[in-house]
Amino acid sequence: MTLRLATFNVENLMNRFDFSGYRNDIRQDRALALYDIKSEDEYKALESARMVAHTDDARQLTALAIAATRADIICLQEVDNLAALKAFEYGYLFKMIGEGYREKYSSQGNDGRGIDVAIMMRPETADGQPIEFVGMNSHAHLTFRDLDLHNEDLAELGIEPDERIFRRDCLEVDLRIGGSDFSIFGAHFKAMSPPRNGMDGRTASMPIRVAEARAIRHIINERYGADEARKRDWVICGDLNDYRERVVITGDMFDGYAFEPVRESALNSIDVLTEDGFCVNVVERRPVLDRWTLYHTRGPQERHLCQLDYMLLSPALAERSTGIPDIVRGGQPWRTPFPAGQEAERYPRTGWDRPKASDHCPVAMSLTLAANRS
C-alpha cells in the first residue's frame, strides 16, 4: 500500500488584512515604509491594495509547489482557517490540477496571529485506494503541568506551569487508507525568537521547542504504548523551527558562494524526537548539503541553509519506506543561493525576494503502509 505524503509551510495563508503596521513599525511592510502616509484610513487602503496585488502571484506559486509534490495528503502550516484554505484550493489548486483535495481539516490552536496547522487530502491515492477520515484530536489545550514538563529553563523564560505547551497545536489525524491504519501528528513548533539575556534567538527559545517535542513523544507513547508505538504506522509532520545541522554560506553573488555543513552540538528538539530510535528523519537520507528546506539570512554575516520542515517516520514505517524524500525548491526566490548541482527551475514570475511560493520548501515522500492492524 503506497501513500504519497507531503508537508509545507505555506507562509501566511490568510483571509484577513493585518493593519497593525500603522502603529508598529516592525509589522509595517517595507513597500509602505517608502510613503508618507497621513492617516490610518489611508494606510488601510494602501495596505489592502498591496496585499491583494501581492497575493495572487504568491498563491499561484504556492499552488505550483503543492502540485509538484504529487501528494495524496499534504500537511500544512500557517493556515488562517478552513475558509482561507477552501478559497485557496478552489481558486488556485483546482484550476491548476483539477479535482483534488476535497477533504480539509484544521483546528484552532494557540498562535497569537491565528495561524494554524491543517491537512488536505484527496478522496483516494494515485493508485485508486480510498483515503478515509477516521478521527481527529487537537492537543492545543495541554499545559506543562498536565504532562509534568515544566522545568527551570522554562521558568527562566517567565513561563508558568499552567501555560499551554504547544505554540500552535499537535493535530492528531487518524486515517484508513485502502484498509491500512495511518496516523499523522501535524505540528508547528515555536519560532526562533529575537535574542535575549545574552543568548541568540534559537538558544533562547529552545526550551519551548524541546518541551513541545517531549509532549509529542508523550502523546504517541500514551496512545500506543512505548513498545507498540515503534511497530505502528505514524508520522510527525510539520515545521519544527529547529535543526541539528545547517549549511553555513560565505562569499557573494559576484565572486561565488561557499557552503560548509556544520553539526550542532547543543540539545535541540529534533534530537529529543529521534533519540533512541523513537522516529526517523528520512530527509537525512539525502546528501548533507541537500537537506535544506529554508534559507535564513540576516545579511552577509548570518546566512545558512537548514532543514526546518520534517517528516519523522515511526521505525516500522521508515524501515518499510525505503525511498528518498523529495524537496520542492522551484518556488524559492532568486535571492536563495543553491549549492552546485541543486539549482531548481524557478516558477514563472518568481521574484528576487517576492513573490515566492513560501519561505519554506515542501517535503514529499512515498510511504509503504502495513496491512491493517486494527
Image (spheres, rainbow, N blue to C red):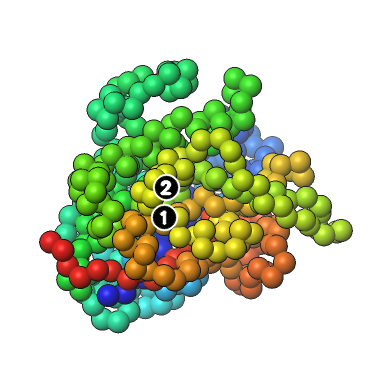
Horizontally, residue 180 falls left or right of residue 349, namely: left
Q: Amino acid at mark 2?
A: Thr
Q: Secondary structure at mark 1?
A: strand
Of all residues, the one furthest to the left in this rendering is: 374
Image point (59%, 20%), residue name: 197
**In the depicted view, which residue is nearer to us: 95 or 8?**
8
Q: Quadrant of the C terminus?
A: bottom left
Tag 2 and tag 1, C-beta contact below 8 Å: yes
Give the vertical position of 21 relative to 361 (above or below).
above
Residue 274 is tagged as 2
Q: Position of residue 70 (x, y in %)?
A: 42, 74
Q: Amino acid at mark 1?
A: Val
Of all residues, the one furthest to the right in this rendering is: 255
Image point (59%, 48%), residue name: 245
Image point (31%, 74%), residue name: 2
Horizontally, residue 112 falls left or right of residue 287, namely: left
Give the vertical position of 50 relative to 218 (above or below).
below
Q: Is residue 243 visible?
A: yes
Residue 280 is tagged as 1
Q: Position of residue 327 (x, y in %)?
A: 52, 65
Q: Position of residue 209 (x, y in %)?
A: 44, 36
Q: Quadrant of residue 373?
A: bottom left
